[in-house]
Amino acid sequence: MIEGEDESKLVPLSASAGTTNGLAYVIELWNLPRTAAERVIGRASSILVARAIFAAARTEHLGRRVVLRRGGQVIAESG
């Protein structure tokens, strides 16, 4: 930012920056009946980071359904 520039004039670099901060990949923990996502465990902009979060979540939540998705596309799931 240029010194003296008004911060209110700054514009996000992408349209999604305001809602998900540009983090396209989502890792979800599903409820026990497997009917819906219980909570979002993590978000990532890189598939490599997303897969690492997914692997850690699978280890921590054995037997639970963990889903890695990008938008409506399921990339990986466990449980």
Image: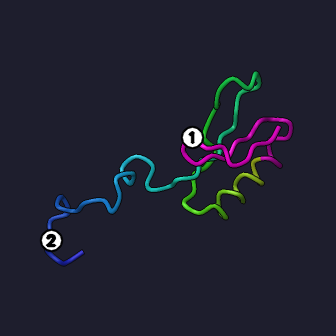
Q: Position of residue 39 (x, y in %)?
A: 62, 35
Q: Is residue 67 magenta?
A: yes
Residue 32 numbered mark, or none: none
Which kind of residue does numbered mark 1 sit on?
Gly
Q: Which residue is outermost to the bottom? A: 3
Badge 2 is on which residue?
Answer: 5
Badge 1 is on which residue?
Answer: 72
Asked which secondary structure carries label 1, the reply is loop
Q: Residues within 10 Å of mark 1 (few under 14, many from 20)?
A: few
Residue appearing at x 24%, y 74% in the figure: 1
Q: Residues within 10 Å of mark 2 (few under 14, many from 20)?
A: few
Q: Position of residue 34 (x, y in %)?
A: 74, 26
How many numbered marks are there? 2
> How many angstroms separate mark 2 from mark 1 (CA)?
39 Å
For marks 2 and 1, give the one nearer the viewer: 1
Which kind of residue does numbered mark 2 sit on?
Glu
- Location of the C terminus (image quadrant): top right
Residue appearing at x 67%, y 64% in the figure: 48
Residue appearing at x 35%, y 58% in the figure: 14
Q: Is residue 47 left or right of residue 15?
A: right
Q: Is residue 29 magenta?
A: no
Residue appearing at x 45%, y 49% in the figure: 20
Which range is magenta? 58-79
The image quarter containing residue 52 is: bottom right
Q: Position of residue 7 (x, y in %)?
A: 20, 63
Do labels 2 and 1 touch, CB within 8 Å?
no
